[in-house]
Image (cartoon, coloured by chain):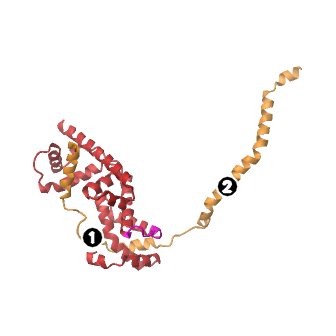
Chain colours: A orange, B red
Amino acid sequence: MRTTKARNWQELVDLARKAPRQDEGVVNVPFGFATRVVAQAFAPVERGVASLFEPFAFRALSLASLLAIAAVAANVSPVLQALGDEIAVVNGDPIGELLE
Amino acid sequence: MSDAADATFDLAGCLERVRQSDQLAAKELVDHLYPLVIRIIRAHLPRRVAEEDIAQDVFLKMFTRIAQFQGAVPFTHWVSRITLTTCIDLLRQQKRRPEFRWADLSEDEADVLDTVLTNEGERAPDEALEARELVHRLLGELKPDDRMVIQMLDLEQKTIAEIASLTGWNTSLIKVRAFRARRKLRQLFEELEKKERR
């Protein structure tokens, strides 16, 4: 069963539908409209030199990502080794060593 | 364009020529489709918008994407869909309207709303214009997608299948949007009724 509010809306819509529609009647194309639109649609797109590389941009990004991962993989063990040495130096007791 | 001209227009041939970059054919296509596009814009956007600029935007999109048209749906449906999507995008860009208030209504609009809310009095036929204005004000309170669905369902009396064909949305989504829109409209009526009683 419909609620009162739903009926309110339906009554309002039923009444609104009786109003003459503003989109009825003959619609004339504004003078020069088609010419303007077509000229814009078919205008040659000016492309700069940089745009020549656009088709390769995605491939270049993939290649750069792969190289970055490879660089990290290749250098991870020397970096870890250097870090380990640094930690050993920091943890050492230089005063104790001097007194011995 | 008249109906007779519509009937004799060779749409398939014209499209073929447009695909071969025939500008004359492109102009004929724009002239042929302009009434369809402008009617959709007028039906779904507020009157104050620059309809010619929006129509131009629609046609530019049409020419940009024309290579993607596979013929799965009639070309006019495809163009209608582009127009509707453009309208929805514009509605989304518009700032949310302030709260719906009695004070903003004209005297005639307030009378119509009062009659509808109280279920009293006869509906005069000349109240139809005010009723339409009111409906559009209320629709303006909805989310653009929900508004589009409820407008096509209730005002234009389109079926869910027709809406699905025009918008490309599936039927479940359309039903959800209609449900959400009706719930919001009920809330609006309740709020208006409370305000009226104050």
A26 sits left or right of A71 in the view: left
Q: Residue at x 58, y 65 (%)?
A: A51
Q: What is the crowding at mark 1: few (fewer than 14 residues within 10 Å), some, or many (at least 20)?
A: some
Residue A52: x %, y % from top left: 61, 67
Q: Residue at x 36, y 58 (%)?
A: B164
Image quarter of residue B169: bottom left
Residue A85: x %, y % from top left: 80, 34
Q: What is the crowding at mark 2: few (fewer than 14 residues within 10 Å), some, or many (at least 20)?
A: few
Image quarter of residue B90: bottom left
Q: Residue at x 12, y 52 (%)?
A: B123
Q: Which residues are magenta?
A: B64-75
Does residue B2 show up? no
Does the CB distance between marks 2 and 1 fall below 8 Å? Answer: no
Find the distance from the CA under tag 2 to the CA under tag 1: 56 Å
Q: Is residue B74 magenta?
A: yes
The extreme left residue here reads B121
Q: Is residue B47 magenta?
A: no
Look at mark 1 in the image and give the residue it sits on.
A27
Q: Secondary structure at mark 2?
A: helix
Q: Earlier in the sequence, mark 2 or mark 1?
A: 1
State which chain disc 2 sits on: A
Three-letter code, disc 1: Val
Three-letter code, disc 2: Ala
State which chain disc 1 sits on: A
Residue B157: x %, y % from top left: 26, 58
Q: Residue at x 26, y 78 (%)?
A: B4
Look at mark 2 in the image and give the residue it sits on.
A64
